[in-house]
Amino acid sequence: MADSAGRSASTALTRKLARLTALSDEERDAIARVPVRQRNFPAERTLMGWGSLVPEVLLVEAGWAFNYWLLADGRRQIFDFLLPGDAIGLRTALFGFRDRMTATLTLVSATGVAWPDLIALFEEQPRLGAVLVWEAARQESRLQRYLLDIGQRDARERVAHRLVDLYERLAATGNVRGGAFTLPVTQEMLGDALGLSFVHVNRTLRWLRRQGLVVVSGRRYELPDIAALKRIAGYDETAAPRAQAFDGEGIQTLFASLFRGQSSGMPERGER
Amino acid sequence: MADSAGRSASTALTRKLARLTALSDEERDAIARVPVRQRNFPAERTLMGWGSLVPEVLLVEAGWAFNYWLLADGRRQIFDFLLPGDAIGLRTALFGFRDRMTATLTLVSATGVAWPDLIALFEEQPRLGAVLVWEAARQESRLQRYLLDIGQRDARERVAHRLVDLYERLAATGNVRGGAFTLPVTQEMLGDALGLSFVHVNRTLRWLRRQGLVVVSGRRYELPDIAALKRIAGYDETAAPRAQAFDGEGIQTLFASLFRGQSSGMPERGER
DNA sequence: CGCCAGGTTGAAAATTGTCAACACGTGTGG
DNA sequence: CCACACGTGTTGACAATTTTCAACCTGGCG
């Protein structure tokens, strides 16, 4: 399980933060000094359980994991898939409660950052703390979109929508090649994420295949016509703060003023 | 719409925070000095829209509101109902994005606190900032439970579960009397919250009524046998951090260390 | 008085789930 | 090297749940 302890430059942390905001040289230096551990986890292994405290935050570099919860009779809801570039345990570290399970899907290699070391970084560079808290919130906000999907959309829309969602998230970190990506997930798990039976997932995928909207070979999914797929999905570009960059004035103002012991600039008034 | 501007002692804010954590005298003093405005909003009025920044956080004292999103064709998902005691706009103020609409259901009377004034409070009493951020996260975590409900449970379980959920939340703020509460919501809205058609909500309620588990007269809902209703709902006491008190070491540590090296005394460690 | 929103109900239709069978590839043990 | 088990994907037939459509009822209110 664990491996390669000790300290090393935290390039994964730098990459993660750089994707969210433009970093100053000073900030880059501070991030590079954060001690990290390279961690590898085998496939299909519980990463974090219910109620457990999280000694470190994991930044996924390769591999997939997922959040889920089981009902007493075995029904399972998958809340979200965690992809390369995602952080695991951030909300738990911050808020101290964990109401879901997390398990790996494939082999996951990640960078582990101890919580106190992250604190130390934020202390030196409060803006980075704001960025990461903001990112945790953004990650959580996906739950709301999924609630909308499962509550209001039919099977075709749901499957199409989730494929587009995964496509876009993977594309943002360079994990899409030639319009295709690897989805290391059985149809049963897809069903558990979408609130559908695996049989119906299968049928829906067949329909999408016959429409020429999805080409599946093994676990490779190719989406030849994203625009058409988005149309099927009823994809709403405005709804999600998807590609939105960090400008979290609120949390940033909060962090900044806490750190300076003085209230700095007021949050700007909203327009539109 | 708005009314009674000016400053006054923020008893609503005190009550809100006192429900979440034990307050020291010093903290109470600081809270009491926060300027607030009493606000009243008529029923069925948009409170906050998409993308709008929030000039103030609202603490609901009486009345109901709800978060929702509309699809292009008019389908509506209600994400959550906001009850007396809930805060509105906290996440938006913190994270600077709003991917949902909020509207009143009934007349809502609330205490409005300007964001800069809250910042000033947190600056003086960082632990209170941690408490409120933590509360915002806890509020968001309900979305996950609703996702579980809608994804995995059938109509009976969903309706029963939501009634129990509302009952418990209302009871926590003293809004249940004689095992009954007022649900100022049409069956259509209930359906939009549960991912069901209003006709099916109606039929499911009829079934629950005939089981003697729910007594409805107008918008008064009485739950004579909560235990049985919880059984129907597959209610899982362990799943939700429902009655959990604040001890968020993570966010608290973060806030504390950010503020360290500064003026005032350290926030006390949480005792659970 | 009559309108209208919301609740209620039945019947029919659509969607989705369940059951059962088979296909296919991979890995393992004989 | 083959046979077999096993996990996963695929499909058809059928069942269950849920939605849709269309009434009708009720109470509040202009």
Image: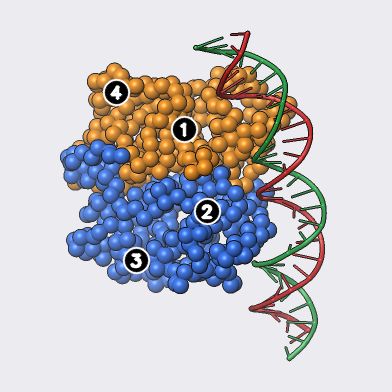
Chain colours: A blue, B orange, C red, D green
- Going by the numbered disc 3, the residue's amino acid type is Ala
**In this rendering, is residue B83 above or below A161?**
above
Q: Nearer the viewer, mark 2 or mark 3?
A: 2
- Quarter of the rendering containing residue A255: top left
Query: What crowding class fits label 3: few (fewer than 14 Cα within 10 Å), some (14-19), or many (20 or more)?
Result: many
Q: Amino acid at mark 2?
A: Ala
- Horizontally, is B43 left or right of A192 in the view? left
Q: Residue shown at 63%/19% (left/top)?
A: B217
Camera-near label (4 vs 2) is 2
Residue A21: give x, y in percent of width and height.
28, 57
Residue on which disc 4 sits? B37
User: How far apart are labels 2 and 1 at the CA level?
Assistant: 25 Å
SS for tag 3?
A: helix
How far apart are labels 3 and 4 at the CA level?
Answer: 46 Å
- Look at label 4 and name its amino acid: Arg
Residues indicated by labels 1 and 4 sit on the same polypeptide chain: yes
Q: Which mark is residue B141?
A: none
Whole-number angstrom distance, CA of label 1 to CA of label 3: 39 Å
Label 2 marks a residue whose chain is: A
Does residue B202 lie above or below A255 as drawn?
above
Q: Give x and y (percent) for residue A163.
A: 52, 60
**Of C1 and B65, the residue lying toward us:** C1
The image shows residue A85 at horizontal and vertical percentages of 40, 63
Which numbered circle lies on residue B66?
1
Q: Nearer the viewer, mark 1 or mark 3?
A: 1
The chain carrying label 4 is B
Whether pointer 1 and pointer 3 mark residues with C-beta atoms closer than 8 Å, the reply is no
Subunit under mark 3: A
Please name which of the two marks, 1 or 4, marks the residue nearer to the observer: 1
